[in-house]
Amino acid sequence: MLNKLDTWLTHHPDRAGLRGFKRFLTEFWFFGLKEARACLFAGLFFVAMFAIPRDGFAGVSRYDLLLVFALAVQAAMLVFKLETWDEVKSITLFHIVGFALEVFKTSGSIQSWAYPGEGYTKVFGVPLFAGFMYAAVGSYIIQAWRLLDVEIRSHPPYWLATLAALLVYANFFTHHYIGDYRWYIGAFILGLYARTTVYFTPYDRRRKMPLLLAFVLIGFFIWMAENIGTLAGVWRYPNQLGAWSAVHISKWSSWSLLVIMTFTIVANLKHIKHTVAVSRD
């Protein structure tokens, strides 16, 4: 049924007679539907965070159940051809990259946040399901790219984009020792992608927006999702141990940078596979 839904979402003849506010509402509606469909994995994952009791179920901890759930959803998306093997390999890479960051950030010497619950599938203090939160971001970008028929124009040289992504990832680690250079990296990225435009199709017409704006908007919604995750008590920041409070707004910039890193991986893989049009003017 989801394959039929995808076909319905992505195949629309040009409706020249659709104009004004009615066109805006139609395109906005279909854009929202496509975004919701692209967030299928992430959405189900966050529903599970609230649906699974904090103390687990039938003697199995919440962290272990979340891992089983994430693996089941991932397997189902592959079986029902909602993702290809190549996409699963990409998502696995996001899982590994994210899990490595989680291990570092929760280590005894850093303690940026913590997973307070018990679980058999915790490795170095981090539940194995945690990597799926980063994989969910990669899954969203891959799905949205297909559903919205994304095309990137004026893409910067791939080696520079890769360098920027590596700097972003490295800064997540090194800022604990040699200072936080995210704003310098951000300025570099701002110049790198200043001319880059993303073309997408919400309904039947091509639309465009600056790619940098897309990074910021996606980062904002991930920051909102992080607030939901901490509210559910799946993980906690030090200032949330006594009572819950909103995740600091500065995390928005961190997530936006992580989106850029994730996008770069997807764009490079797609460029190598020649599966989408990514062009430089």
Image: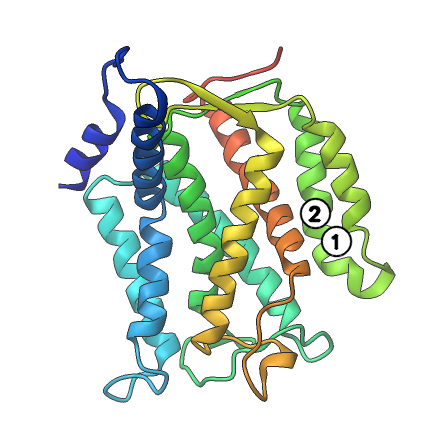
Is residue 26 placed above or below 39 in the rendered structure? above
Q: Nearer the viewer, residue 200 or 61?
A: 200
Residue at left offset 32%, top offset 18%: 19
- Whole-percent x and y of residue 277? 46, 17
Total marks shown come to 2
Residue assigned mark 2? 168
Give the side of residue 106 with respect to residue 35, left or right: right
Give the side of residue 15 with respect to residue 192, left or right: left
Q: Nearer the viewer, residue 175 or 225?
A: 225
Give the side of residue 113 with respect to residue 40, left or right: right
Q: Quadrant of the N terminus?
A: top left
Binning the other alpha carbons within 10 Å of mark 1 as few (below 14), some (14 to 19) or many (20 upward) gives some
Judged from this view, the residue extending furthest toward the right is: 178
Q: In which quarter of the image is residue 34?
A: top left
Q: Quadrant of the C terminus?
A: top right
Give the side of residue 154 with respect to residue 6, left or right: right
Question: Please, what secondary structure does the residue beneath circle 1 have?
Answer: helix
Render colour scheme: rainbow
- Which numbered circle lies on residue 171? 1
- Whole-percent x and y of residue 174? 78, 58
Q: Quadrant of residue 12?
A: top left
Judged from this view, the residue extending furthest toward the front is: 21
Q: Which amino acid type is marked by label 1?
A: Asn
Residue at left offset 41%, top offset 44%: 140
Is residue 97 placed above or below 13 in the rendered structure? below
Is residue 123 placed above or below 151 in the rendered structure? below
